[in-house]
Amino acid sequence: MKTVNAATYGSCIHAVGQLTPSQGRLQNLDLVAKSVEVLGRCNHMDFPFKMGMKHKMEYTRQYLHLRPKTNMFGCFLRLRNSLAQAIHNVLQTDGYVQVHTPILTSNDCEGAGEVFKVEPAETKVMQNLEEAGGKGKSKDHFFGVPTFLTVSGQLHLEAVTGSICKAYTFGPTFRAENSRSRHHLSEFYMLEAELAFADDLEDLMKVMECLIQKSISYILENNQDDLYWYWKFVSHSDCETIVKKMILKSFVRMTYTEAWGEDLQKEHERYLVRHCDGLPVFVTDFPTDIKPFYMKVNSNKRTVTVDLLLPEVGEVCGGSLRESNLDILEQKLESLGMSESLSWYLDLRRFGTCPHGGFGLGFERLLQVMLGIENIRDAIPFPRFVNSCKL
Amino acid sequence: MKTVNAATYGSCIHAVGQLTPSQGRLQNLDLVAKSVEVLGRCNHMDFPFKMGMKHKMEYTRQYLHLRPKTNMFGCFLRLRNSLAQAIHNVLQTDGYVQVHTPILTSNDCEGAGEVFKVEPAETKVMQNLEEAGGKGKSKDHFFGVPTFLTVSGQLHLEAVTGSICKAYTFGPTFRAENSRSRHHLSEFYMLEAELAFADDLEDLMKVMECLIQKSISYILENNQDDLYWYWKFVSHSDCETIVKKMILKSFVRMTYTEAWGEDLQKEHERYLVRHCDGLPVFVTDFPTDIKPFYMKVNSNKRTVTVDLLLPEVGEVCGGSLRESNLDILEQKLESLGMSESLSWYLDLRRFGTCPHGGFGLGFERLLQVMLGIENIRDAIPFPRFVNSCKL
């Protein structure tokens, strides 16, 4: 056998040889090598991952740039890719059109306040603008107006459903939340879908239920090796049972009043799901005071909304019918002082609107359920949160 | 026939009736309605689009929120969706794994300077941080360090190719360029792919050529109606011929020296493509002084790079082999004063690297070629550029 350089643990090699049935118990095949060439040596003394050791999630997370090299995270990356593809497949097959809603926006969708603002890094850019300008509005802002990172693509999607009946957006969204909890990220992926002519919450619940069940089934069919490996060596022990149950039965449906009676907290959500035999639970008809302006309100003064709670992580989806009545929406926006900045949104009701609704799904949370991942920072390749934006 | 309210142009209606062969020439079918209900009336006097009129691109662009209602833009949205799906399909079928590289980053990849910085919009968030803090570093920045919007996911992809041999990212990227040209946006979509074990530019050129040809073929097969409609009523007259030519022959390959001899400009690019009988042209081996640090340099002091020029729009892709030699890369980064901030990037060469390379493809530019769209602002649903961030 010809070798150039000694191959250390973690090295990248080019081996040529014959695959033969293995004599050992840990694998099916051995490569009997004729030549081994070291393409990239690994300084294994400094390399943070050690041969034969199972490193803790918290430990590997310290090395975001090398984490993909662990078999745990390589496996995760393939599964995350497949779940994203599954979501696209299910929606595209059902006639949905993906629309790239913008990351940069001059709206502050939910009026939540916890948004990021965006400006050029170099003051030079702004100085050039000022000199070239004259219109004046460019003086303070690159875009002429204060600009933020999106917290939701919903309003933009609503503009699109004026002609595309089923639309979705699937990309990163942002929150400037000062939270170091294992449930929150500053940059996370959200699937948002919007349906023209939806006039019943059941329309939305069917889409959510079908999307989640079909996506899980897709992974079970297409990524067996990776999924079972991850369940066996990484997930908590109940994960397989929990996930398989989710595709066997319909999700539970109940109103907010039936479910609880005050604002649901994270710990209540998980209790509720356990109470429902571990099945996913739709909770509908939330009180008006805890939901945003664009949601339709029914005759009982309840919003026509639905949250979907999944085992272990709680809320994964939130949806609602949208207020399509121009007068009611105008009144609401006026009382919030937003009727001018959102006059374009009122236009959507002015020029040929229809009943419609939609929902958002937290992609990392769904991954957490499917793979039994405790900390959301291990459900995304490059987690961002307060005081941490590595790489 | 029962009607509730009069339906004006632009109204949304619910019609029930029988589809019958049309007596007219402009369509194949008529709906003979038994009932028509107006779901959303349109104030057609104020509605910016008028019945029977073909509005100019520049005009419809003023109404981003209503533009999807024009048949021109509805058609475009479906085609944009299909081209994105085609790209996913081609790459996934070829074994590529999509990785969500971050939008927020503490790197300034190309050292270009024209980047956006990100901070919380409310000073309250930073005050709370300061009070809670103690570590000090959170005082000035939410993430503890200056944070920017990504200009490229390449460096993050390189970290992933340490284990996933073929990876890609497909999402928005950002430039704080003070340009109002019809070729530039501040937020645009880029497909970036990275291949482990690529040691020849031909490896990259094959992927680009195959990706573009297969994607176009996919649209020709799956979106005939929309594509031919758009070509007939919206595109410039040569578009169909130009696009069909691109899938018939191999792309031209030539070196930078053969092609020109000084830095190629937009107008040179288009001239070169015309000179090559309208075929796409790969230009390789650029001088070192006009390309960034991570590119491999060959023995002739030329970078191992390739740009792909397409008809009408010029550069659509740029790629290179990456410098995988630790010592050379370390020297380069030191001379640029970046060896500390990019020490993680050096680690990728320290711990089991391999020869690798990749490329980026401007998604809107490819759409411009395919659909003969003159202004890039009409190739994206919600265009962002200096002094404009509507909605």
Image: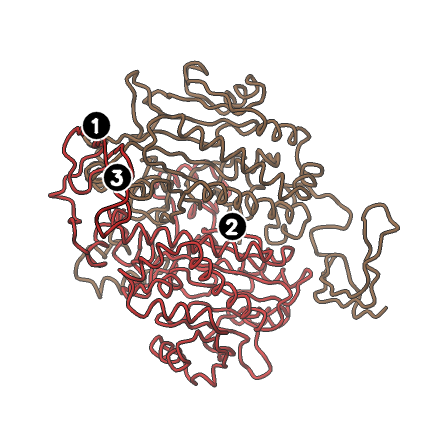
Chain colours: A brown, B red
Question: Looking at the rendered structure, which numbered label has been put on residue B143?
Answer: none
In terms of image quadrants, where is residue B325? bottom right
Q: CA distance from mark 1 to mark 3?
A: 34 Å
Answer whether residue B288 is visible to the viewer in this image: no
Q: CA distance from mark 2 to mark 3?
A: 46 Å
Asked if both marks, 1 and 3, belong to the same chain, the answer given is no
Which of labels 2 and 1 is toward the front? 1
What chain letter is assigned to the residue under label 1?
Answer: A
Of B64 and A41, nearer the camera is: B64
Residue matched to label 1: A328
> Tag 2: Cα neighbours inside 10 Å, few (<14), some, or many (≥20)?
many
Q: Amino acid at mark 1?
A: Ile
Q: Quadrant of the N terminus of chain A?
A: bottom right
Q: CA distance from mark 2 to mark 1?
A: 40 Å
Of A296 and B68, nearer the camera is: B68
In percent of width and height, residue A106 lies at 29, 46
In terms of image quadrants, where is residue B386? bottom left
In percent of width and height, residue A125 lies at 31, 62
Q: Is residue B53 above or below residue B9?
A: below
In percent of width and height, residue A187 lies at 46, 44
* Label located before the other in sequence (2 or 3): 3
Residue matched to label 3: B31
Residue matched to label 2: B100
What chain letter is assigned to the residue under label 2?
Answer: B
Asked if both marks, 2 and 3, belong to the same chain, the answer given is yes
Q: Amino acid at mark 3?
A: Leu
